[in-house]
Image (spheres, rainbow, N blue to C red):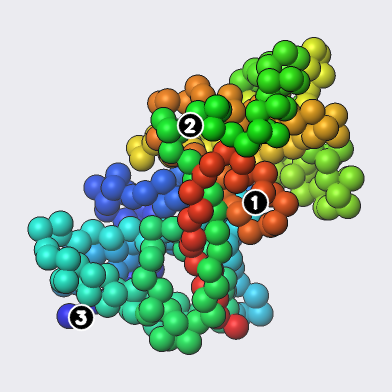
């Protein structure tokens, strides 16, 4: 069955299809990342006889006349949204999706000099990319069903931190205060000898843009007047997902487990959402922290060429 791939700007895409796009494919979200990183985003549209069957967003750069794709920092997943009739049998649905993925793989390899993309966890079938000669690597994240969360089920050491320290001394505000964000970030990044990218004006403008568009919420953990943790979450209001986006923490906050208190608060109060995605379980120490919340380990794939 023939499928064609067309590269379109968001203003060339049918409005009715834009409304059906998943969270990580929303034009307003993509435009925030594109502006921050000075790239252009497109939609790769897979069609069959002028009927759209799948849409994949990509961020494109040019260098020395060559085109390549990037996966922007904090843009955690590249989705491929399928629009295949639900009434089809599982046999036909699976094979149509596989054929579409094959066309995407061929198109990407032909059109772009190099790329490295993190596919959305919903994309389980990566055979087409492997067969086309891509590098494929499994990555991992943790997710938690919010309504199933019970602090009583946490490991003993974690509960001890909550009961002995946090519940008595700490409290949370939902302030959008980038001065606190900057102070905690600078302190944290300096101690880790990391670049201060997250506190540059370009990045602060990006955060404000996300906030103004309603894509994120924020939590600050305090002990008295001292801010210990600043956590930003992305909100997928349609599918009821929360994504851990960025956090900064002071040394004092680290010592008393203020970040544990913060996530416990979110999981205990955000029943308006269904899933919390911790967005990553690949770093050993960070993964250990996230696993304390009795999460499900979920894998996704990094695909690359060159």
Q: Is residue 233 visible?
A: yes
Q: Answer with the quarter of the image where residue 97 lies.
A: bottom left
Q: Secondary structure at mark 1?
A: helix
Label 1 crowding class (10 Å Cα cut-off): few <14, some 14-19, many 20+?
Answer: some
Residue sitting at x 16%, y 71%: 91
For disc 1, the marked residue is 287
For disc 3, the marked residue is 2
Q: Is residue 228 left or right of residue 246?
A: right
Q: 13 or 5: which is nearer to us?
A: 5
For disc 2, the marked residue is 149
Q: Answer with the quarter of the image where residue 250 lies.
A: top right
Who comes first in sequence, dot 1 or dot 3? 3
Where is residue 112 drawn, in percent x and y? 51, 78
Q: CA distance from mark 1 to mark 2?
A: 18 Å
Q: Is residue 125 left or right of residue 62?
A: left
Q: Are marks 1 and 3 in contact (CB under 8 Å)?
A: no
Taking 92 as reference, is 288 above or below it? above
Q: CA distance from mark 2 to mark 3?
A: 46 Å
Q: Is residue 273 visible?
A: no
Q: Is residue 240 left or right of residue 280?
A: left
Where is residue 282 drawn, in percent x and y? 63, 59
Where is residue 95 drawn, in percent x and y? 22, 75
Residue 11, numbered label: none
Q: Secondary structure at mark 3?
A: loop
Who comes first in sequence, dot 2 or dot 3? 3
* Count of numbered tags: 3
């Amino acid at each position: 069955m023939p499928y064609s791939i067309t590269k379109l700007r968001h203003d060339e895409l049918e409005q009715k299809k834009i409304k059906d796009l998943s969270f990580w494919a929303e034009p307003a979200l993509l435009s925030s990342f594109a502006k921050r990183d000075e790239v252009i985003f497109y939609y790769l549209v897979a069609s069959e006889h002028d009927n759209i069957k799948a849409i994949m967003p990509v961020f494109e750069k040019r260098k020395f006349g060559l085109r390549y794709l990037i996966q922007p920092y904090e843009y955690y997943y590249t989705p491929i949204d399928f629009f295949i009739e639900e009434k089809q049998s599982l046999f036909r649905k699976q094979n149509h999706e596989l054929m579409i993925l094959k066309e995407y793989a061929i198109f990407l390899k032909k059109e772009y000099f190099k790329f490295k993309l993190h596919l959305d966890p919903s994309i389980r079938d990566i055979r087409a990319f492997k067969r086309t000669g891509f590098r494929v690597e499994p990555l991992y994240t943790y997710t938690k069903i919010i309504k199933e969360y019970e602090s009583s089920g946490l490991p003993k050491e974690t509960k001890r931190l909550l009961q002995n320290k946090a519940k008595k001394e700490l409290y949370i505000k939902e302030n959008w205060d980038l001065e606190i964000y900057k102070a905690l970030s600078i302190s944290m990044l300096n101690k880790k000898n990391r670049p201060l990218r997250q506190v540059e004006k370009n990045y602060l403008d990006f955060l404000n843009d996300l906030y103004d568009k309603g894509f994120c919420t924020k939590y600050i953990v305090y002990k008295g007047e001292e801010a210990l943790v600043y956590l930003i979450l992305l909100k997928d209001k349609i599918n009821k997902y929360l994504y851990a986006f960025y956090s900064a923490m002071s040394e004092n906050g680290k010592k008393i487990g203020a970040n544990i208190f913060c996530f416990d608060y979110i999981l205990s109060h955000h029943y308006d959402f269904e899933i919390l995605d911790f967005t990553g379980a690949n770093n050993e120490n960070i993964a250990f922290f996230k696993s304390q919340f009795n999460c499900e380990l979920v894998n996704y794939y990094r695909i690359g060429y060159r």
